[in-house]
Amino acid sequence: MKTSGVSHVILGALRHGPRSGYEIKQLVDKSTRFFWAASYAQIYPELRRLADAGLIVPAGEPSDSRRRVRYRLTPAGRAQLERWLRSPAAGYELRDEGLLKLFFADAVPRRDAHVLTRQLQAERQAILDRLREIERTLPEDVPTSHVDVLRYGIEFHEWVVAWCARLADRLDSDEGDAEEGTSR
Amino acid sequence: MKTSGVSHVILGALRHGPRSGYEIKQLVDKSTRFFWAASYAQIYPELRRLADAGLIVPAGEPSDSRRRVRYRLTPAGRAQLERWLRSPAAGYELRDEGLLKLFFADAVPRRDAHVLTRQLQAERQAILDRLREIERTLPEDVPTSHVDVLRYGIEFHEWVVAWCARLADRLDSDEGDAEEGTSR
DNA sequence: CTCCTCATGTAAGCGGTTACATGATTTA
DNA sequence: TAAATCATGTAACCGCTTACATGAGGAG
C-alpha cells in the first residue's frame, strides 16, 4: 500500500495505543495542526484504507457505551511507521502570504510597508501566545518528542516576531526618504 | 473579480513593468517559490482571467522577434494590488514532514531519532546553502524588499540548523538511557 | 426536554501538481 | 542540423477543505 500524508499521521497517532478517528482528529488539532493538518474527510476514509491494507485493525476493546471504533497498529503497521521514520525524505512546503506581501512591499509607500510589517508581527505574536498557552497547560505524560516540537514552534515564532520588529524599526527610521515605489 | 493566490503573485510581478507568463514563472522559481510556488497551469489561465477582468492588459511593445505576450497593470490592477497589500489578512500554511517525523520520533530508538534529526539538519543546511548562493549572485537592481525576504529565509534556516544541532546533541549525550519507545 | 458534545461519515468543489503537446528561436 | 531554450498552453489527476447529514449519549 502507498502510504503518504495522512497515513503517517494516523500510524503515528496509534503508536502508543488504540485511538478512534475522532480522537486522532482531536490530537491533530491540538498539536500537529501547526505543521501538518488533517480533516475528518481525510482521516475516516484513510482509516478504511489502512485497515484494508492490514496496517491497522479495530481494537476489540470493551466499549464504554459509546459508539466508537478504536484502531490499533498491527505488526505490519508498526513496521511501516518505523520504515517511514527511518526514511531520509522529509519534504517541506510553505505558503506564507505575509512574506509574499513583504516581497512586493515596494509597490506601496514606506509608511504602508511599515504598517504591513507591524500587522505581520502582531499575527505571529498571537500564534506565539497560543503556543505558550499550550505549553503552560501541557499534561505530565506528554512524550518529550512532542515537547521538543512545541519548543520549536515557540522559539521559531519568537525569532519571527523579533525579525519583524527589526524590519519595522528600520522602515520607520528611514522615514523621510523618497516616498512611493522605488525603495531601493 | 475575486483575486486570490496566483493573482497576487502576478499582480506583484508586474508592478515594475510588463512581464510574460514565462518570465513570471522564472521570477517565481528564483524567488517566491520558497514561500509561494506557482506553476504554468496556474499562471496562464490566471493571466486570461485578470485580463478579462481588466486588471492587466497586453503591453503592445515592439517584439524582439519572439512570440510572446507581456502584460502590464492597468490602473485598476495597480489599485487591486495595493488594496491587497494594505489588507490585514495574511494566512500561513505549513507542511513540514521533518517536524512530523520528529513529533513521532519516540516510536523508534533514541539512536534513530538522532539520525533523523541529523538528516533534517543536513536538508535544511542544503537549502541554506542555496539561499546563500542566491544572495551572492544577486543583481544590483534588486528591490530592498526582495533582499529583506531573502535575508529572512537565510536567517531562518540558520536558526533551524542550529536548533537541529542542539536537539541532536541532546539526543546524543543522553545516550545510555533506556532504549526503545518511552523516551520521556 | 433541550442543548451540547461525541462520533462517523460523504459530496462538492477548489487549488494545485504532473505530464503532456506544440512549435519557434537560438546556440553548438 | 541537432540540441537546448524560449514560450504558451491544457487534461487528468490528487489532496484537501467546506459544508452538510445523521444519530447517540451526557449535561443542565
Image (cartoon, coloured by chain):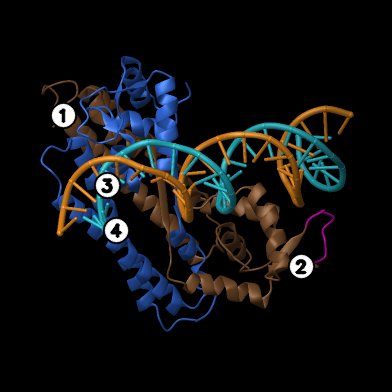
Chain colours: A blue, B brown, C cyan, D orange
Q: Amino acid at mark 3?
A: Lys
Per the image, the residue denoted by label 4 is: A127
Q: CA distance from mark 2 to mark 1?
A: 63 Å
Percent position of residue B54, x then y: 71, 71
Q: Is residue A56 placed above or below A98 in the rendered structure? A: above
Q: Count residues near mark 1 (Cα–Cα under 10 Å), then give few for <14, some for 14-19, many for 20+.
A: some
Quadrant where the N terminus of chain B lies? bottom right
Look at mark 2 in the image and give the residue it sits on.
B59
Which quadrant of the structure image shows residue B139? bottom right
Q: Residue at x 22, y 39 (%)?
A: A146
Residue picked out by circle 1: B183
Q: Nearer the viewer, mark 1 or mark 3?
A: 3
Separation of disc 4 and disc 2 at Cα? 43 Å
Whether callout 1 and callout 3 share a subunit is answered no
Pointer 1 chain = B
Tell me the amino acid under the disc marked 4: Ile
For this rendering, which residue is in front, A86 or A103?
A86
- Label 4: chain letter: A
Residue at label 3? A30
A96 over B86 or under it: above or below: above
Q: Earlier in the sequence, mark 4 or mark 3?
A: 3
Where is residue B30 drawn, in percent x and y? 56, 50
Q: Are marks 4 and 3 on the same chain?
A: yes
What range is drawn magenta here?
Answer: B61-68
Q: Which amino acid type is shown beneath numbered disc 2?
A: Ala
* Most frequent secondary structure within the magenta stretch: loop
- Asked whether residue A165 appears in the rendered view, the answer is yes
Q: Give the mark nearer the N terminus: 2 vs 1.
A: 2
Q: Marks 3 and 2: CB-CB under 8 Å?
A: no
